[in-house]
Image (cartoon, helix red, strand yellow):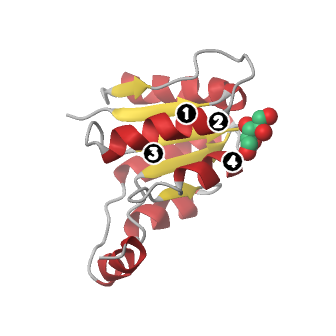
Amino acid sequence: MKPILMGSDHAGFPLKNLLMEALTSEGTPVLDVGCGDETSCDYPVFARELCERILSGQASRGILICGTGIGMSIAANRYHGIRAALCTTEFHARMSRAHNDSNVLIIGGRVTGSELALAILKVWMSTPFEGERHQRRIDLIEGC
Ligand code: RB5
């Protein structure tokens, strides 16, 4: 089973740890691509590390966390084949999977509280892509 990749900057580090604990406690393998502590660092470095691993096939999905989620979102969506969804509600998480086949979940560590983040994670992990007309739209994005 491929791991769920996890990446953050310093502002997302505490929430990343919480979500990693939640995933590992239920038996989901995770791989942390950094950062490793709350020392100030640059979110694009970790967005790149995570996205390149997904695009190389090491993993199918990942989670990125920075302070607002916006920087990680901008950075991750520069990579062709990455569909990164900044989610602030469970509805966003559900629809990003069902309609957009999001392969990266982004949460703002300074925006979204722990309980809501855990709920978003649970929905994102368990919602399948619906395909059909939504696949056609993704193909248009990807240039297929
Ligand atoms: C770091 O201070 C902060 O700018 C970063 O975590 C993120 O919110 C950027 O979009």
At mark 4, the secondary structure is helix
Dot 2 alpha-carbon crowd within 10 angstroms: few under 14, some 14 to 19, many 20 or more: many
Badge 2 vs badge 1, beta-carbon distance below 8 Å: yes
Distance between mark 3 and mark 1 Cα atoms: 23 Å
At mark 3, the secondary structure is helix
Q: Say which amino acid is labelled 2.
A: Tyr
Q: Which residue is mark 4?
A: 71
The x and y percentages for residue 115 are 63, 38
Q: Residue at x 53, y 23 (%)?
A: 34
Residue 65 placement, left or right of 3? right
Residue 69 placement, left or right of 136? right
Q: Which residue is mark 2?
A: 43
Q: Which mark is residue 122?
A: 3
Q: Earlier in the sequence, mark 4 or mark 2?
A: 2
Distance between mark 2 and mark 3 Cα atoms: 24 Å
Q: Residue at x 36, y 58 (%)?
A: 127
Question: Does the residue tagged 2 have its C-beta within 8 Å of any atom of ligand 1?
Answer: yes
Q: Say which amino acid is labelled 1.
A: Phe
Q: Which mark is residue 46?
A: 1
At mark 1, the secondary structure is helix
Question: Does the residue tagged 4 have its C-beta within 8 Å of any atom of ligand 1?
Answer: yes
Which marked residue is nearer to the observer: mark 4 or mark 3? 4
Badge 4 vs badge 1, beta-carbon distance below 8 Å: no
Distance between mark 4 and mark 1 Cα atoms: 11 Å
* Image quarter (top left, top right, bottom left or bottom right) of the N terminus: top left
Q: Earlier in the sequence, mark 4 or mark 1?
A: 1
Q: Earlier in the sequence, mark 3 or mark 1?
A: 1
Residue 100 visible: yes
Dot 4 alpha-carbon crowd within 10 angstroms: few under 14, some 14 to 19, many 20 or more: some
Q: Residue at x 38, y 59 (%)?
A: 81
